[in-house]
Image (cartoon, grey):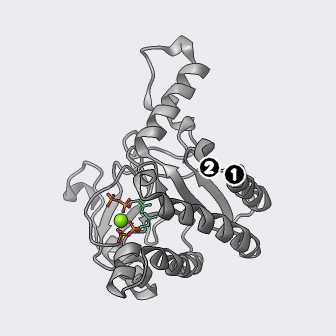
Amino acid sequence: MGIFSSSTSSIPEVIEIPRHIAIIMDGNGRWAKKRFLPRVAGHKVGVETIRAIVNQSIDMGVKYLTLFAFSSENWRRPPKEVSFLMGLFRVVLIKEAVKFNESNVRFVMIGDRSRFSLSVVAEIEKAERLTSSNTGLTLTIAANYGGRWDVLQAFNAMQTAHPELASQYREADLSPYFSMHYAPEPDLFIRTGGEKRISNFLLWQLAYTELYFTDTLWPDFDNSAFKLAIKSYQQRERRFGRTSEQLR
Ligand code: IPE
Ligand code: IPE
Ligand code: MG
């Protein structure tokens, strides 16, 4: 059993401040292009935005923040951009892990690690180990992550563990094997950069998440932009299949 209830098996509690926010940080390349800078300059500035949003999440009392940093399809980008992103990932991990730890942040990385270099994997594991007993914000970075990959790896792991249940699997049998088994489903999903799609992010977990799309490019996504997203979330009526009348 997962520790958190599922939005389809039972009705989650609705609270003012989202417990879990999941973000597709999009628009770094366009931000740079507008300034006649190389795309990678946008990724660099995007790291500053991550810092600010992490701190604001801590201040607001958000418990889980999940950031999509690199999708399983981003390997299709020019090799130069991919290797820049890998290098940036490693440097940021080294630099930020100590700071995360000082802020009581628990760091977790989800995604298929098998394609990362040994030095990147080593830094991921180091940061996870260092912060594993922290009790503040859980910051999850999704890297080489794909929602379909996650569903399939969960299913395969479940089947290996419980072959005797074949053809009788229920949702509760599967939930402990998802990459994000340690977190409740996201209350709020944010995508910056103007696109209105999920791009293979958390497919299973977004079943009843409130979706928020903004044209603001990720490097421009500041504290007030983040507050607007939270405000929009607070105005939603989360019915989970019921009628408005039933909520009163
Ligand atoms: C998001 O910004 C960051 C990553 C995918 C790593 P993009 O690089 O996708 O920026 P745009 O969408 O091209 O502007
Ligand atoms: C989604 O952004 C992935 C990340 C932000 C890491 P993309 O820029 O890769 O998405 P598409 O290709 O526009 O759907
Ligand atoms: Mg993009």
Q: Earlier in the sequence, mark 2 or mark 1?
A: 2
Marks 2 and 1: CB-CB under 8 Å? Answer: yes
The residue sitting at 54% across, 64% down in the picture is 85
Secondary element at tag 1? helix
Q: Which of 107 and 113 is in front in this view?
A: 113
Amino acid type, label 1: Val
| Disc 2: CA contacts within 10 A as few (<14), some (14-19) or many (>=20) | few
Question: Which quarter of the rendering shows the C terminus?
Answer: bottom left
Q: Nearer the viewer, residue 21 or 111?
A: 111
* Residue 131 makes an appearance in the image: yes
Report which residue position mark 2 lands on.
116
The residue sitting at 74% across, 63% down in the picture is 134
Find the residue positioned furthest to the top. Answer: 164
Question: Which quarter of the rendering shows the N terminus?
Answer: top right
Report which residue position mark 1 lands on.
121
State the CA–CA distance, disc 2 to disc 1.
Answer: 6 Å
- Up the image or down, 220 lies above or below 210; here it is below
Tell me if 99 is positioned left or right of 150 in this view. right
